[in-house]
Amino acid sequence: MPQLEEDGLLRRVAHPSRPRTGLLELTGTGHARLARVRQHQREGLRERLGQWPDEDVETFSRLLHRFVTELE
C-alpha cells in the first residue's frame, strides 16, 4: 500500500468511530485512475464479445452472473 500512497492514489484516514483504527480511501487521482481502468476493461470486453452471436453473449452473461452470485 505504501506505493499507492506515494503515487497519490490512496490516503489513510481515521475511522469515524474508532480513533485508533485507520482506513484507506481513494484520492481524487485514485478515483480517476480507477475510472480509466474500468473504461478500458469495458472497451476490451465489448470488443471481444462484439464478435460473438447475441445468444452466446446472453448465455455467458447468465452463467457469469450465476458464478459471481454463488461466490457470495
Image (spheres, rainbow, N blue to C red):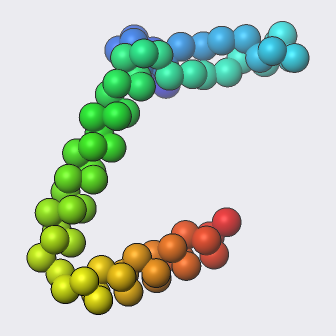
Compared with 44, 36 (above or below) is: above
- Residue pictured at 71% horizontal, 17% vertical: 22
Report how many numbered discs are placed on residues in the image: 0
Residue 50 seen = yes
Compared with 31, 27 (above or below) is: above
Residue 3 seen = no
Location of the C terminus by quadrant is bottom right
Residue 35 rendering spot, x and y as whole percentages: 34, 34
- Residue pictured at 87% horizontal, 17% vertical: 17
Outermost front residue = 54
Corner quadrant of residue 32: top left
Lateral position of residue 46 relative to residue 29, left or right: left
- Residue pictured at 24% horizontal, 62% vertical: 45
- Residue pictured at 40% horizontal, 76% vertical: 61
Compared with 44, 31 (above or below) is: above
Residue placed most toward the observer, 1 or 24: 24
Residue 54 rendering spot, x and y as whole percentages: 25, 83
Lateral position of residue 9 relative to residue 39, left or right: right
Residue 8 rendering spot, x and y as whole percentages: 39, 12
Corner quadrant of residue 48: bottom left
Compared with 34, 66 (above or below) is: below
Residue 10 rendering spot, x and y as whole percentages: 48, 19
Corner quadrant of residue 60: bottom left
Lateral position of residue 50 relative to residue 18, left or right: left
